[in-house]
Amino acid sequence: MAGRTRELIPKKLLQFYEFHEWRNAIAVLNGAFPREWADILRVLSAFRILRSDIGELGEKGGGKSKVAIRMDRMFRERQWKPEEFDTSIVVRTTESTQTIESPTHEVDCFKAKVALEVEWNNKTEFYDRDLNNFRLLFDLRVADVGVIITRCDELQNVFNALGKGGSYGKTTTILSKLKRKLDGGAGGGCPVLAVGMKPTLYLDDIKDPSVPVLRFAAL
């Protein structure tokens, strides 16, 4: 991350997150989508990983964790919405016209032309799904930038200490795997920002019930 780009991120957020960009994603967000960039920074500033969320699903029978659900809701409060696109490719020749379906997966959080996904503890194949989505939506001029918020590898030490390590691990969505995919060109031409949650985000709200669940703290 270049020096000028680093200046676009509040210094206090660097204590809690790792930021990695491809194709100048931060400059695109700051310059073309200042309101959406401000939303992202405010949500990141307010969010904390709570002990009561570790290893817990947020909905009965659902696959999303409480961590992902809480962050999703914070974006919803700022008018980010899930969005699914009906896309297809039309091929015309002198003899016929053929329509080829090219479905995309629903984007968890979408606003303006910014697509954002929260990947807390899914299989790593979800990164492929997200990046393929970003690439296709970018090529179709539907999205100009993609953002994936995930967890840093070092959080495994927290999970192990809590006896929850078996629910996580190297086969799930961790930042190092996302970086390798992006370095290999999985994002195509789409600018992508990867944000990794550091262990410093962790708060023990069970041992200390007075721990506040922060909302939109001022930057």
Image (tube, rainbow, N blue to C red):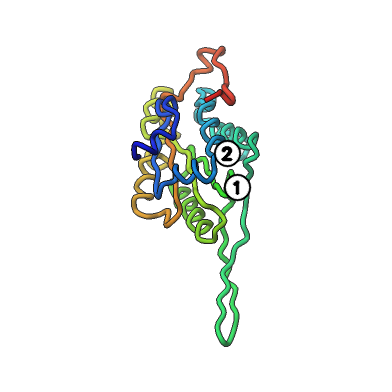
The location of residue 163, given as percent across then percent down, is 42, 25
At x 49% / y 50%, what residue is drawn?
130
Left or right of 185, for residue 30: right
Q: Nearer the viewer, mark 1 or mark 2?
A: 2
Coordinates of residue 155 in the picture (x, y in percent): 40, 29
Q: CA distance from mark 1 to mark 2?
A: 9 Å
Q: Which residue is rendered at x = 43% and y = 57% of the image?
A: 189
Give me the disc on residue 35: 2
Label 2, residues with CA under 10 Å away: few <14, some 14-19, many ≥20: some
Residue to which mark 1 is pinned: 112
**Hey, what amino acid is under mark 1?**
Ala
Please, is residue 148 above or below residue 103 in the view?
above
Question: Which one is in front, 4 or 107?
Answer: 4
CB under 8 Å between discs 1 and 2: yes
Quarter of the image where the N terminus is located: top left
Residue 2's place in the image compared with 92, above or below, is above
Residue type beneath disc 2: Arg
Q: Nearer the viewer, residue 189 or 74?
A: 189
Q: Residue at x 56, y 64 (%)?
A: 102
> Is residue 101 placed above or below 180 in the rendered structure?
below
